[in-house]
Amino acid sequence: MQFFFEVLIAGLLSGVMYALVALGYVLIYKASGVFNFAQGAMVFFAALTTAGLVDSGLSLWLAVPLTMVAMVVLGLLTEKFVLRPLVAQHEITLFMATIGLTFFIEGLAQAIWGANVRALDLGIEDVPLEWLLESANIAVSQFDLIASGIAAVLVTLLAIFFSKTKIGRALRAVADDHQAALSIGIPLQHIWGIVWAVAGFVALVAGLLWGARNGVQFALTFVALKALPVLILGGFTSVPGAIVGGLIIGASEKLAEVYLGPYVGGGIEGWFPYVLALLFLVVRPEGLFGERIIRRI
Amino acid sequence: MKYITRIFLAAAVATVTWSASAQEQFIPAIDYRVGPYAAGGSGFFGGAIDYMSLVNAKGGINGVKLVWEECETEYNATRGVECYERLKKSHGGASLVEPLSTGIAYGLLDRVAQDKIPMTTLGYGRSDAADGRVFPYVFPLITSYWNQAAGMIKYLGDKAGGLDKLKGKKIVHLYHDSAFGKEPIPVFEAYAKQLGFELIKIPVAHPGNEQQSQWLQIRQAKPDYVILWGWGVMNATALKSAQRNGYPREKMLGVWWAGSEEDVIPAGAAAKGYSSMTFNTPGNYPVLDEIKKKVYAAGKGNLEDKGRIGSVYHMRGVTAAILWVEAIRKAQEKYGKGKVMTAEQVRWGFENLNVDEASLKALGAFGMLPPVKTSCLDHEGSGAVKVQRWDGKSWKAITPNWVTGDKAMIRKMQEEGAAKYAAEKKIKPRDCSKEG
């Protein structure tokens, strides 16, 4: 039983890390109806920029705000040169544009900082909590616990931002209908600029935590793969949904790998969350917390 | 008259240029400098190009200069095959091909045999391709995965106080869930049966950036050693996860694709004390100094970051190019010094390589790689490995001499594997006694 709980806790903590990446997708989708394929590339760009600045001799405390500035600029430029010319175009057109953006950002990051892999030290030791290990023989990573705390704070802030602020309400209006929002005087470009900047901030937080966890390398773009089933499960428009989806995906993939894996040759962690998400999609297409769309046909 | 003189002069220059290019031996560089594995690709191909530049700076191979053209694959098998097809007839024809990718190598296996172009697969690819009777155009030079796996068990046995001391021990094989990760399993299983240790196989799904469930299983099994057969982000993640779960890195032994700076630097302090296999002894060598003096000082170095000269991937690239150049040199001894060799002639050179200690001394690479002697039967040429340890800043060799496992057992397995492949593909193995 102790081992079961150990696996479950590890899964829940990993799930929070997936949710961090999923949040970036939710933000952009919620505000603009665009599935931003480039979110993984943004995570990589943010982590590489911070690590690059630190390696150039800057302190982490200076490198992080500078990277934040870079992410805001990247977001604003994306809005101006990629999204603005495509206003009122079909969703698939915007989606294709973000695919192009992915390759551009990946290339840009490596062109600026090179292809070398880097370490990123946030000063948080990634070791098991000793007292828990000694008292209950359960290994829980100190780093993952702190990362979960950061994610909780971030989600709370974003939830308040969306529901309690004027900009948050404007964001939701834009998401519902671009043209209707424009007609009542909501500045679309301004709103999109803000949301891309906020998504850049979320990408920075995810990049810092994932970069410190596994190192800063191109493979950071792959963390996006972990976020997709989270989105399907939690819904594309719900911030709390991303967290709950992350927890479910994290816990189920770990339990499946440990208890189901040995019967099917192991290595199922990669595809199991997708199967789970697919099954969920059949029962509840809008996800756990997504908005149910009812259309008259 | 002046105009006509100019035309003749231009024609003469063109002729000289053409004849100069006719004295060039073409090597396609099917490489990857962007994408997920760019760090390894840029180091390896940077090293190979640096050595070829050095050879050219010293006058070429008996006057024949080397020329190369790069084609970016991003480690993608389809692009790799496309690059090969695009470059195989360039500059008078490719002398050899080295894709540094198991996927691309598999894609080219039949094509190189058809085009009669030798393919080197240094430290990767099919282990049974060492049987030159079935795979005349493939050269898994120095050491294949199977001999590496045998070397690993030999090392762990030595560490335990003798191979017999491995009886009753638990060894985890933590592997990338792909053909690459599964390749050494037959060797480990044969040794487990022979020596009586328990082999626990734990796969990691690609890309391997999340391994908590695997490491919890490892924690529960309490193994004596963990063999890390990983690639890319999986390696740094494994080291970090080991730390997160309190498993000592001193008990971990990695495949050589988990043994470069790119594998340990992202793991930071978690990598300290970790060991891996290698077919190069880390350190500095006269050939590297020469590259710095004659190539980088002349502004012709391939690496942007000079600090990477002599790094694991760079040294592997230099090693590969040394063997390519020696194969061409060997071919010239038979087919004519100072002539450009055909791919078929270079293949003969690879099959008759004899890079002994004296040659390595002359090349400034003594100790950097083991002596390599190939034949029609043996396209591997060595089978020796070393073990290196990361001290937090650099790799240090911890086995003073080259280590070999049970080479007879491995050879038997290679011959069986090759015979099976020959039967599947309806290949009639060559009779090596008739080869010149």
Image (cartoon, coloured by chain):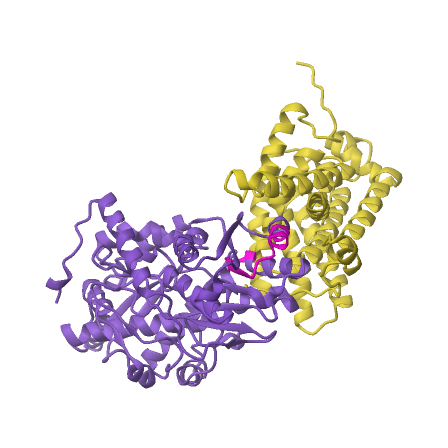
Can you name the residue that lies furthest to the right here? A164
Q: Which image quadrant is residue B101 in?
A: bottom left
Q: Is residue B228 magenta?
A: yes
Q: Position of residue B341 (x, y in %)?
A: 20, 69
Q: Position of residue A5 (x, y in %)?
A: 72, 44
Toward the left, the furthest residue is: B434
User: Which chain, by letter, is yellow?
Assistant: A
Point out the stretch of residues depicted in magenta: B215-234
Q: Residue at x 49, y 77 (%)?
A: B397
Q: Position of residue B167 (x, y in %)?
A: 48, 61
Assign the C terminus of chain A to one quadrant of the image. top right
Q: Quadrant of residue B348 in the image? A: bottom left
In the rendered image of this protein, does residue B408 appear above or below residue A247? below
Q: Is residue A208 magenta?
A: no
Drawn side of residue A117 relative to residue A286, left or right: left
The chain whose colour is purple is B
Q: Nearer the viewer, residue B272 or A87?
A: B272
- For this view, does B433 lie left or right of residue A23? left
User: Closest to the observer: A296 or B192?
Assistant: B192
Residue A90 visible: no
